[in-house]
Amino acid sequence: MVFSEKGWQIEKETFAQELYQRICLDVEEKKARVIFEMKEVNRQVVMRVLDKIEKDGTKKFLPYLEAWKMLEVKKVAARIAEVENKISRRI
């Protein structure tokens, strides 16, 4: 399937929101399920999910982000570290 530019923007946001909600559930239940799927997710979507976590900004995400960071490639791990730092500074 190939998306138009506008279609991709809509799908990217929709998919990112779904993943974010699943991550919130993982955090609430103290489980790490979604992070094992994230390597297969489009990088733009992954970054959008991280934007959403950063915007939420609550410290409850910190242990989850730390676990996720260990599984990721350098660029994504660096973005995760940025999000962790911003959340930590708000506390």
Image (cartoon, rainbow, N blue to C red):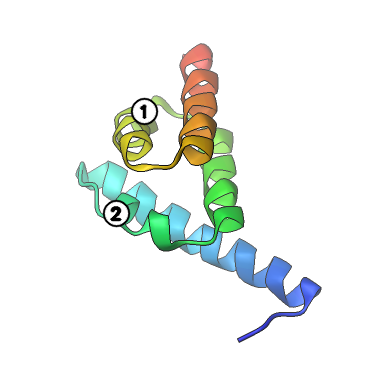
**For the residues marked 1 and 2, what is the alpha-carbon distance in whole angstroms?**
17 Å
> Could you tell me which residue is drawn at 36 percent across and 28 percent down?
62
Q: Is residue 57 left or right of residue 7?
A: left
Between residues 75 and 49, which one lies in front from this camera angle?
Answer: 75
- Measured from the top left, where is residue 77 in percent x and y? 45, 34
What residue is disc 2 on?
36
Label 2 secondary element: helix
- Answer with mark 1 or mark 2, whichever residue precedes in sequence: 2
Whether 38 is drawn above or below 86: the answer is below
| Number of marks present in the image shown | 2
Residue 70 to residue 43: above or below? above
Q: Amino acid at mark 1?
A: Leu
Which residue of the protein is positioned furthest toward the front in this rendering? 74
The answer to which image quadrant residue 40 occupies is: bottom left
Say which residue appears at 40% left-offset and 55% top-offset: 39
Q: Which x, y percent locates residue 56?
A: 52, 36
Apparent side of residue 79 relative to residue 61 in the rendered image (left or right)? right
Q: Residue at x 34, y 59 (%)?
A: 37
- Residue placed farthest to the bottom in the image? 1
In which quadrant of the rendered image does the N terminus lie? Answer: bottom right
Q: Amino acid at mark 2?
A: Phe
For label 2, count other residues whose C-alpha is less than 10 Å away and answer few (under 14), some (14-19) or many (20+): few
The residue singled out by tag 1 in the image is 62
Between label 1 and label 2, give the one nearer the viewer.
Answer: 2
Residue 78 shown left or right of residue 65 in the figure:
right
Residue 73's x, y, as percent?
44, 42
Estimate how packed mark 1 is, as few (under 14), some (14 to 19) or many (20 or more) residues with alpha carbons within 10 Å.
many
Q: Position of residue 59 (x, y in %)?
A: 39, 25
